[in-house]
Each structure stands twice: as structure tokens, then as C-alpha cells.
Amino acid sequence: MARMNMVQALNSAMDVMLERDPRVVILGEDVGYFGGVFRVTEGLQRKYGEHRVLDTPIAEGGIVAAAIGMGVNGLKPVAEIQFADYIYPGFDQVVSELARVRYRSAGEFSAPVTIRTPCGGGIRGGQTHSQSPESVFTHVCGIKVVMPSNPYDAKGLLISAIEDEDPVVFFEPKRIYNGPFDGDPHKPAVPWSAHPRGEVPEGHYTVPIGRAEVVREGRQASVLTYGTMVHVAEAAVRLAGVDAEIIDVRTMSPLDVETLCTSVCKTGRCVVVHEATRFSGYGAELVATVQEECFWNLEAPIQRVTGWDTPYPHAFEWEYFPGPARIAAALKQVTEAA
Amino acid sequence: MAPRSRLHVPHPPARPGQEPDFSYLEISPAGAVNRPDITASARDIENLSLEMVRVLDDEHRSVGPWNPHLEAEELQVGLRHMLLTRLFDDRMQKIQRQGRISFYIKSTGEEAVAVAQGMALQPTDMLFPSYRQQGLHVVRGRNLVDLMCQCLSNTRDMCKGRQMPIMYHWGSGNIFTISGNLATQFPQAVGWAMAAAIKGEDRLAASWIGEGASAEADFHHAMTFAAVYQAPVILNLVNNQYAISTFQGFAGGEHRTFAQRGPGYGIPGIRVDGNDFLAVYAVTQWAAQRARASAGPTLIEHVTYRAGAHSTSDDPSRYRPKEEWQAWPLGDPITRLKQHLIVLGEWSEERHARLEKELEAYVTACWKEAESYGTLTGGPALDPLTMFEDVLKQMPPSLVHQREELRALQASAAKQPHSAPSVAKKG
């Protein structure tokens, strides 16, 4: 086992797959010679050459479309969109093409493309470097949507995504690239080397897509969350002094309903947390699912803690960010309800 | 053996540790390119997209048909604006390095583009800049304090703390809000110009993108709409040789000039020495006259060099030779205009040094004032509750509710000094 931060773990996943499978190619803006603006593809072009790791023009629509074409022609492209906020010029190619090639050709054509993209705020990135658009993509049938919360899962899930025969949109919460973040920006940064999930095997392994994980067992309530917010939820549970179970959803689509609902049926109380905006956010899907599956076990109305329904403001990111205090308040609310 | 295809990957002329090499750059002698009538059709002036309009020669004289014959006083104003833009940039970069603002983007080496163009246009013309044309604000007389306050996200921030530094806007100055998403403003400028034509106004629109961003589909949208409707718009492509780490070959510049895309759409394309203040001024004036005469849009490729990093988040020493800026064959726009004025007998090194000192002091004074309106970490702060405003003109009930939720959280946090900082008020 090696100690890796999330950047290194993701890099290792692509390294392993470039080595194992000659069909794997990496493409994106600044990913080649430079190694990516977040250094996730560092060294890969040097190791595997310019035909395996390609710098591209600045054109997200072109990147996704070219990846589709490569996928249709037998390659396994891993496309990087530099920030999730920049993915929209490629949106038509994702929604109308990538997600539908298999269906509309009755399985005769398919494009096994992985789209990696950093998401989330907390880096003073303002509204164009902080978005969490996962629900925009979970609403599209025909793609899988993943967001890891630690280096071990990041590598295992990315390998699964690359090996998957279907397209995967892979969100990387950039606030936790270098260390887990508990929602307090004033505390010194904690590195992944001090975290158990910073231990990552050097070689090939997978974390299955479609499986959530119980990251903290508890009896009084269930917190359903993913990405950066897993760590913030852990801090909130300590702050609230509530014995809550925390579920890292990990794969937003397809959803591991069983793991989530087993927990909520056990605790009878549920808080859904995400950094993205609230209205029509992914939390609405989680709440609806829990309501359908756990209605007779619920002891309190389900609470959602999310970003506000505004663009991510540069100056007020910590007032915007759904920090531990808000999550703790929601935990108290569900546990103190009759 | 049967021929096999092989993928071409563009290679920059030099990498770190190698000698800078700009032999790929085709440069016309100053004064060599003809200046056609503004009503010329795109197909008759295709040569303008291949050659390079230049006015300042190697002896710093202004020559040829594109010489705009500006008064010395105007040239001095241009020099002042460019110098101020550079000193402002340098100061803001230093301030970012000290952690007092979160981010910055300099325009060093390309000041002539925004400054000469801003001066050649009318104040009523509408500008849709990218993030490296701060010179436009300088030309239009914006108080630097306003720009600094935006970078500080303080109580005088025009964006009310919502945008990253340098994402300025100026309604009364006719400068549109800068987007962090690339190239989006290019076709919007065309739409604005179409509206001006629909309304029968005498105003034109101008927009700027980098050569890197010209790979986005928005470039194509802008060119198509501008050509179809012959919109009164000036579309500026600032070819500063680099996107972030990728050289202009990755934007399609290896095989054709960017200006040559114009004729493909039926739009005149002009390639200009972007570091030649007079040439930039002259081609802008030509394109503006053309737009105002309903003779249609113009694509201008400004050949320049990004002397600094892409942004404060970038480290160019990782991907290009450090010595490139010194080796750049088109020189420094400020030095060139300064030398021209000296040759004219209208400037001197002493006056230049004096001006530099004066502008330095001005920038310092502006910064002191800007800081007094608050910084990211101290002083007066904007009310976070304002973040809910302007999502829609009328705040919907859901946002009223969320605003009250935050207000209550802040009130309870104020009562418990040790509560989580996510709701703590800034000091």
C-alpha cells in the first residue's frame, strides 16, 4: 500500500489502465505536456506518448464528441473537462449523443467514454469554478454518474469507470484533492496521508460502480451524502453529538437503493446533504427514494441541507457552503422530532 | 506496405530549456500592406488576412498607408494608458501573491490591443471583452479604485462579491460583464450589434477572445451570425500564442492564420501586429468605419505574446522557455510607442521615468483607498445576505425563505462565538 492524495490516486488509476489496456487514451485541455491544471495527468504523456495522452483545443463540445468517436472506433477515452463549470459546451454531446448511442442503435454502437471533471467549491473559485452539476447529469438516462470522497475510492471507481462498457461522468470534488475537509476553512489543512482512505494499492483494483458505503455506523439517524460533504457530515455528527449513520452514496446513478434504505429503515430518520443547489438537486431524488422505500419506518420529515439556490458567490463561499452547523441543526431537528 | 494513417500532434517551437524559436511567425515589413477602401469585399482583400499590418518600422517611425497620423498628444495618452495598465497589473499580481486577493490575470505584453482599440472606438460603442482587456476600462476613464474593489470583493465591489477578481463590468461605460466561461461573449456581441442595426443606431459592438478560445463553437456562431446579418461588429481574436499551456497550434494556428478564417465566412480578416499601437489603432478605425457604414463585420487577428502567466494559478516555466518574451520579434508595445514618441521629439527617457513614478504613486493611492473599503480578510464587509439578490429581478419565495434561514443561522452563530465558521460573520 502507498500513501496517496486524491490527485495521485486518480493519476495512478489512469497509469494502471494506460499500462494494462492499449485502448485507453486520455484527452483534454492542458492534460498532456503540462499534466493538467490540477496535475492529475502529470507524467502520463511522458510515459505513454502523445498518441495516448492528448492535449486538445479549448472546446468541450469537441472533446466530448471526439471521445465519442474514439469510443465508437474501439478506444476507451478518458476525457478531462478542466472544471465541471466548463462542461456545458459539451452538454449536447453528452445528453443527445453519448447517453443515447447504445439505445438508438439498439446496442449496435456504443461509446465507453469516461468524462472526468473537478467539481465543487471552497477554493475561492467563484461561480465559474465551483459548481456541482451532478443532478444535471443524473437526470439523463444512459450515463452513469460517480463522485468519490477519498483517494481509495477515487482510484477504484475511476478504474471501474474506464473498464465500464457504458459512459461514466466522474466528478472529482476538488476541495478534497489534497486532503479531507471538514467544512472549517480556518483549520489547518489535513493531508490524506493521515486518513485511512489515503492508503491506496499501487496496482489494479476496483471499487464497484453502483454501490454506496456506510462510512460511519449509527443508530439515531442516517445522513445520505457524497463527495466533500461526507467529511463535513462527519464533523457535523460530532458537533451535534448525534449517533448518526453516514452513507457515502459514491455512485449517484445507478443508485444503491438497498444500502441507503436499509440504513434509513433502521434509524427512521434521514438527512440528505449536498453542496449543489437545493431546488431539483440530487437530494430530491434521494428524498423521493427514501420516502418510497422507508415511509412506514420514518419517524420525522426528511431534511435536506444544500447550497442555497444562487450561483456560488466568490466572497461568501463559507456562508454559501452547507457547513457542519447547518447539518448539525438538521440532525437535531430529525432526532428531536417526536 | 499499404499506407497507414498516423495522428498528427502539434509541437510548439520550443520547450523549457530550449532556445526560443519564432521562425514560424510571418511578419510583413512596416508599411508594406495596402489599405483598401472600407467597402471592399472580403474576397478582394484576402491578402490582409495573410500579411501583417504594421506601421512602426525598425527605426520607430510611422510609415505606410495604415499610418493613422495621430497627434503627439494622442500618442502620449495612449502611452500613459498602456503604462498605467501595466503598473496596475503588476501591483495586483503582487497583491495576489501576498494573499490579499484570490486570483489575478495580467495583460502584460498585450496592452496595445485594448488601449489602442479602446481609443479608436467611440465611448458609446459596446464592448464585450474577455478577461485580458483591462486596458479598455483604463481608456474609458474608469477609476482604478473600482477595479481594485472588484478584485477585493469589498463593500464597493461592483459585483457585490459574486465574481472572482477581474470579472469586471461597467454599465455606464458600455463594457459588458465578463464571463468565466470562454468565448461566450463573442456571439453575444454580434447579437448586440444586430439589435443596434435593427434599431437603426450608430453604435457598434466589439468583442475579444483569445486564439485558444476560438476553438469553442461560440467563435463559429459569432462568425456565422455576423456574416449572415452583416452585423456592425468588430470581432477581435487576440493571438497571444498560448492558451494555458498549449501553444497556438492547438487552436488550429499551424496551417492557416486565424485571420484567414474571416474570408471563409465572407468576413474580411485582418492580421495586425498587435504590439504596434499605431497599427492596432488604424485597423480598428478601418473596421469601425466599415461597421458604421453598414459595410459589415471585420475579424481582426492581433498577433501578440502573453508575456506573463495565464493567471496567478499558472506556472509557464513548466511548458515554455523563460526567454521567449525577450525573444519575441514584435517587441514590447510600450517600449515601441515610447521610442516612436522619442523619435518624433515628443518624449524622452526622463519624461517616461517621471510618468512611471507618477502612475506608480497613483496606483498606490488607489490601492490604499480600495483597501479602506474592505478586504477579503478584514475591514468593512459586504452583507452575505445580499447573495440572494439578483438571482431573479424579484426574489422568489424559496429564496426569501433561504435568506431568512441564513439570517437566523447568523444570529445564532453570533450568540455562540465558538460555533462553526460556515455561518460566522467576517471580521
Image (cartoon, helix red, strand yellow):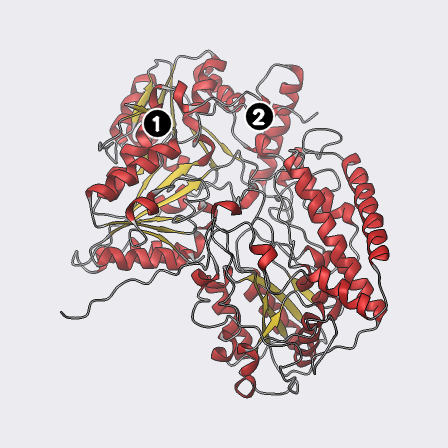
Residue A53 vertical position relative to residue A308 in the rendered view, above or below: below
Q: Secondary structure at mark 1?
A: strand
Dot 2 alpha-carbon crowd within 10 angstroms: few under 14, some 14 to 19, many 20 or more? many
Quadrant (top left, top right, bottom left, bottom right) of the N terminus of chain B? bottom left
Q: State the image coordinates of residue B15 (x, y, percent, origin top left).
A: 45, 52
Q: State the image coordinates of residue A195 (x, y, percent, origin top left).
A: 38, 19
Are dots 2 and 1 on a single chain?
A: no
Q: Which residue sits furthest left?
A: B1
Amino acid, disc 2: Ser
Residue located 29% across and 53% down the image: A99
Residue located 34% across and 19% down the image: A196
Dot 1 alpha-carbon crowd within 10 angstroms: few under 14, some 14 to 19, many 20 or more? many
Q: Which residue is mark 2?
A: B422
Asked if the residues shown at circle 2 and circle 1 are in contact, with their CB atoms under 8 angstroms apart, the answer is no
On screen, residue B90 versus residue A313, left or right, reads right
Chain ID for label 1? A
Residue B3 vertical position relative to residue B46 in the rendered view, above or below: above
Q: Secondary structure at mark 2?
A: helix
- Label of residue B256 in the image: none
Q: Visible in this render: residue A302?
A: no
Q: State the image coordinates of residue A141 (x, y, percent, origin top left).
A: 29, 49
Quadrant (top left, top right, bottom left, bottom right) of the C terminus of chain B? top right
What whole-number distance in Å separates the C-alpha atoms at marks 2 and 1? 22 Å
Residue located 58% across and 53% down the image: B179
Residue A311 vertical position relative to residue B53 in the rendered view, above or below: above
Q: Quadrant of residue B422?
A: top right
- Label of residue A248 in the image: 1
Residue located 84% across and 63% down the image: B347
Amino acid, disc 1: Asp
